[in-house]
Amino acid sequence: MDKLFDAIRNGRLSHAYIIEGDALSGKYETAKRAAKAVLCEEAPGEGCGRCVICQKVEHENYEDVYHVSADESSLKDAVIAELQENLRHKPSAGDRNIAIIEDADTMTVRAQNRFLKTLEEPNPGTVIFLLSENRDNLLPTIRSRCVTYRMPAVYDEDNPYVELAADLLAKAENGGYFCDIKDALDKKIKDRKSAMAFLDAAELLLMRYFTGREKSMWSPEHIREVVGFVEEARRDLNFNVNYKYALRNMLLKAGM
Ligand SMILES: [Zn+2]
């Protein structure tokens, strides 16, 4: 996903993206993060998470971000038609319209063909995120007009970073001491890349806690808060903050 955010930061934004990954991979969260990165004026290319724009995107009430998803079975043609109509209008708050299309691969062929028009001639400033479990379910003509990002592999408990994250989160839940947790982290994390992998794994695990797939003693509110700290640490790394400092900061904020 780094590549997507690098592109946004560097102003090399395409008008259409496919974000591909399975159900637990956090595609929607990623699209929302990307929308913030595109729209935020406090931290352009990043999203500060605090300004009015970021808050509105987070709570899905920013005027120019259109979010559609499937009903119980598929994404309805009428929903796509309405979205296309919305994207034809000028943005009302800023200078961009953003569409987040969940379950894009459940669009009918008819709807996909119709949507091609929007992909071929989007209004200036339009950014479209098609979220898909498998991009092969989208028409080749759609795929060829989008930049695809594949979400990182989903939860694998044998992944060493997932193991480390599980171990440290268990320690933290049980009231472990900051210095113990920090020492364990220091032993395994030796550079920025491994720090990033650890943060990805920690977030993956926290999302499993959040959705109840994994048992946790923490409340959903606290888990959400900690996810926020993990995201901040990731943002720090993207801003080339020293990885040790970023991780230490995260632990302190999380009260570990
Ligand atoms: Zn912001």
Image (cartoon, rainbow, N blue to C red):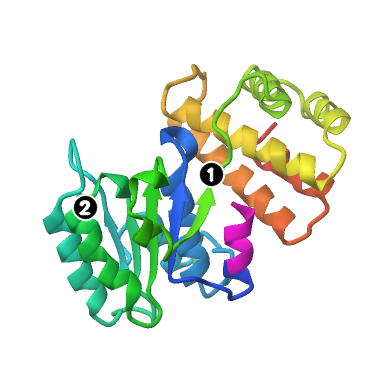
Magenta stretch: includes residue 216: no
Residue placed under numbered mark 2 in the picture? 109
Residue placed under numbered mark 1 in the picture? 151
Name the quadrant of the C terminus: top right
Residue extending farthest front: 140
Would you place residue 133 above or below residue 69 in this image?
above
Visible residue check, residue 226: yes
Which kind of residue does numbered mark 2 sit on? Val
Q: Secondary structure at mark 2?
A: helix
| Magenta region, main secondary structure | helix
Magenta stretch: includes residue 3: yes
Which kind of residue does numbered mark 1 sit on? Met
When asked about the image quadrant of residue 59, the answer is bottom left
Residue found 47% across the figure and 41% down from its top:
21
* Whole-percent x, y for residue 227 in the image: 55, 40
Left or right position of 66 against 162: left
Marked residue nearer the N-terminal end (1 or 2): 2
Residue found 22% across the figure and 69% down from its top:
84
Q: Nearest the camera: 106 or 157?
A: 106
Which residues make up the magenta segment? 1-7
Residue extending farthest left: 78
Q: Nearer the viewer, mark 1 or mark 2?
A: 2
* Whole-percent x, y for residue 236 in the image: 71, 55
